[in-house]
Image: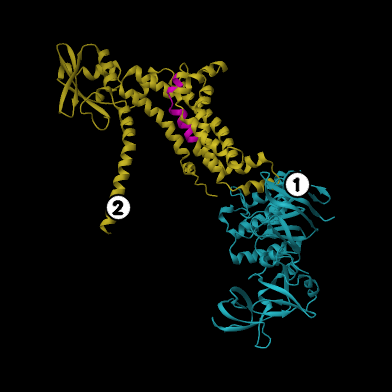
């Protein structure tokens, strides 16, 4: 059994609005797990149920083999970092960190030691006597981190802790959170809607949509081996291009046919696709898996509609029979809008079932 | 500066000054009236500022002293009283001119007029004469002040405790009919105090709380609880829920969270709220007249004194006595008043 086990967890608001739908998930000890999804997908609700801030409608939450479903938040052994930091403004930084320890009736000496230790880890030792109002957003976030560290919890919960910081600070704090996690080896659940945050922090990512889990996997699995159209669309910037194609069989070849192009499917997937003969499926191609190539190897020719230079690479928006495709290239920097490009494709493409949106394997 | 700007500025200051005059003039009127002597009050036109002293002239005619008071309006000494009885002079000086002298002092000052012609004297007025008189004619004024403080204190305590709890519930919990309840809170305030005072009296008598300050405070609290709930709910809404949730996650119970996190953060707003409760209780005389006639509060006492004496300077003195504690209270909480409008900076 995993360290933390969510069993058929369900949350309904006012008896009808389904926020989390029959979700099951195991989290291993020392793991950094990220719940990722668009707003309203139930990721925060799931975390709040684990913290005890939200009642569980159905299902169970088991931590270290014991159900914590009915326990008060304080008895669950979890600590949490909030989106707004939730650093109490009427207490000094020291009092903020010591709050939980005082409630545990620890001795003054022990409290002092723990606060000092947590403050050192979060790099805020020089601010201990200050009021939070005198601190910047990033410093307040560190106070929230120190406060969470001081209680030495079994489980860290982080609810979009970086989303109120400016872009540059977010990346610094991201690295620091990872560093703290690696030093302590603490089990962490991190909620975010920012995929780059998820990718850079997570051991495993749980992609959620409409209260259910779309896919669980390492960042690389999630990116390179999407289970569904939703994941392919949600992960990656720019997102995966989707093109409707018809599957046709000619002799022993399996062909994906589009009005502007057609190509032979040579990967192992062609066996499965045979059953889709004559049907429409969705071809998913990540922007970097289109190639700018020469006349001979081209799949189709297309006019550049926009160019979005990004420095290290360029995003080109091209047209394909009334549809817009985004391609990413590290080679084309001097292409003008309106120019014709020869577009090829490598073999890292996905096929999705048009009805269910699920990956065809 | 453009003409338009000058016009705008001028208009602005005219409005400010008008408002200031409107606010300060009654206050000035009361304070100056409370310092007049009886003689000054009935002079026409009345002097703008109260006199600090009186110039008098004493002559000796027909075996009687004649007392003249200098009238600076018409620049002559007006004959006020002539008698041979020194006691009459002492009483006249005290009652009409607020001058406190003993018979011996009067005798020694006046006697020179018997031989050496008119005697001119300048006597200092006792500025606080009206206040002293107010306390002496209303023999239980100090008790009444204490009563007022107790009644206001209870009112603040009751309405803030119950009102803030209701406000917290409205702000934090979802329940059916919440918006209607929130609106209906203000309905309570639509009933005039007099309308509910009689039924309240019946209840208070049944509970044995009539003529007590606690009973009076309960009645004052009726309207104030609703208002406090209304104001505090917006204050609580201004406090980020995550601050409370953090407290719960880090080991506090709901109640500890309320005491240690919510209350300190809402405190400034609640202090401001207490002003309404204070003023409501402090200024009321009608409800007190019905419910606690035998154990009056200060404002009731002044209300009664007004009817008794009928002299404007005594009523004014009472009013000033009533205003001062209210001013002090407002001054103490002045830093918090902005919070009333939900201006909670966290």
| Label at residue B244 | none
Crowding at label 1, few (<14), some or many (≥20) Cα neighbours within 10 Å?
Answer: some
Where residue A322 appears, as percent x and y from the top left, is 58, 74
Where residue B311 appears, as percent x and y from the top left, is 31, 21
Where residue A325 appears, as percent x and y from the top left, is 62, 74
Asked if B161 appears above or below A306 in the picture, the reply is above
- How far apart marks 1 and 2 lie (CA) works out to 66 Å
In the image, which residues are magenta?
B274-289
In the foreground, A55 or B165: A55
Helix, strand or loop: magenta stretch: helix
> What's the chain of the residue with tag 1?
A
SS at mark 2?
A: helix
Q: Quadrant of the C terminus of chain A?
A: bottom right
| Label at residue B8 | 2
The reply to whether the magenta stretch includes residue B278 is yes
Residue highlighted by disc 1: A58
The chain displayed cyan equals A
Asked if B243 appears above or below B78 in the picture, the reply is below
Q: Colour of chain B?
A: yellow
């Amino acid at each position: 059994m995993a360290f933390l086990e969510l069993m058929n967890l369900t949350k309904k608001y006012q008896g009808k609005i389904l926020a989390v739908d029959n979700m099951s998930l195991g989290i291993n000890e020392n793991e950094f797990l990220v719940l990722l999804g668009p707003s309203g997908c139930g990721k925060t609700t799931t975390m709040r149920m684990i913290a005890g801030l939200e009642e569980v409608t159905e299902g169970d939450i088991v931590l270290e083999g014991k159900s914590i479903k009915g326990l008060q938040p304080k008895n669950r052994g979890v600590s949490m970092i909030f989106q707004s930091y939730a650093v109490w403004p009427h207490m000094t930084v020291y009092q903020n960190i010591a709050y939980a320890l005082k409630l545990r009736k620890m001795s003054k000496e022990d409290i002092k030691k723990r606060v000092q230790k947590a403050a050192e880890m979060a790099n805020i030792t020089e601010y201990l006597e200050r009021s939070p109002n005198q601190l910047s957003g990033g410093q307040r976030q560190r106070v929230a981190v120190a406060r969470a560290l001081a209680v030495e919890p079994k489980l860290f919960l982080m609810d979009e802790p970086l989303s109120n910081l400016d872009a540059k600070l977010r990346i610094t704090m991201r690295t620091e959170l990872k560093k703290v996690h690696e030093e302590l080896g603490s089990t962490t659940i991190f909620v975010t809607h920012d995929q780059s945050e998820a990718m850079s922090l997570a051991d495993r990512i749980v992609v959620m949509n409409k209260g259910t889990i779309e896919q669980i996997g390492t960042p690389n699995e999630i990116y390179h081996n999407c289970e569904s159209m939703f994941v392919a669309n949600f992960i990656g910037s720019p997102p995966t291009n989707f093109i409707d194609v018809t599957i046709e069989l000619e002799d022993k070849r399996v062909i994906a046919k589009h009005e502007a192009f057609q190509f032979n499917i040579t990967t192992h997937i062609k066996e499965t696709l045979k059953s889709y003969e004559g049907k429409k499926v969705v071809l998913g191609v990540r922007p970097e898996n289109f190639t700018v190539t020469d006349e001979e190897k081209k799949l189709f020719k297309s006019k550049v509609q926009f160019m979005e230079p990004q420095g290290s690479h360029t995003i080109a928006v091209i047209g394909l029979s009334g549809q817009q495709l985004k391609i990413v290239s590290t080679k084309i920097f001097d292409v003008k809008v309106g120019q014709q490009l020869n577009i090829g494709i490598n073999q890292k493409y996905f096929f999705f079932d048009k009805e269910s949106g699920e990956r065809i394997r | 500066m453009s003409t338009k700007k000058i016009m705008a500025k001028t208009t602005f200051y005219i409005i400010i000054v008008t408002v200031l005059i409107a606010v300060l003039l009654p206050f000035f009127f009361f304070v100056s009236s409370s310092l007049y002597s009886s003689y000054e009050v009935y002079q026409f036109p009345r002097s703008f500022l109260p006199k600090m002293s009186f110039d008098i002239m004493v002559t000796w005619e027909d075996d009687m002293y004649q007392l003249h008071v200098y009238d600076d309006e018409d620049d002559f000494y007006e004959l006020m009283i002539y008698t041979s009885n020194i006691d009459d002079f002492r009483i006249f000086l005290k009652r009409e001119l607020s001058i406190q002298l003993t018979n011996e002092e009067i005798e020694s000052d006046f006697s020179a007029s018997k031989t050496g012609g008119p005697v001119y004297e300048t006597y200092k007025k006792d500025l606080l004469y009206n206040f002293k008189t107010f306390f002496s004619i209303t023999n239980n004024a100090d008790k009444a002040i204490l009563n007022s403080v107790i009644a206001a204190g209870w009112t603040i305590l009751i309405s803030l405790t119950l009102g803030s709890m209701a406000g917290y519930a409205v702000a934090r919990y979802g329940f059916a009919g919440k918006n209607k309840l929130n609106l209906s809170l203000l309905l309570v305030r639509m009933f005039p105090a007099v309308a509910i005072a009689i039924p309240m009296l019946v209840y208070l008598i049944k509970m044995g709380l009539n003529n007590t300050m606690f009973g009076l405070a309960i009645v004052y609290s009726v309207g104030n609880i609703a208002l406090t709930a209304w104001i505090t709910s917006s204050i609580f809404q201004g406090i980020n829920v995550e601050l409370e949730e953090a407290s719960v996650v880090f080991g506090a119970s709901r109640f500890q969270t309320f005491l240690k996190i919510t209350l300190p953060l809402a405190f400034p707003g609640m202090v401001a709220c207490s002003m309404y409760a204070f003023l409501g209780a402090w200024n009321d005389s009608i409800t007190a007249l019905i419910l606690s006639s035998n154990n009056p509060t200060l404002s009731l006492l002044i209300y009664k004194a007004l009817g008794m004496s009928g002299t404007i300077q005594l009523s004014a003195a009472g009013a000033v006595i009533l205003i001062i504690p209210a001013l002090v209270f407002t001054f103490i909480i002045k830093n918090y008043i902005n919070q009333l409008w939900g201006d909670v900076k966290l």
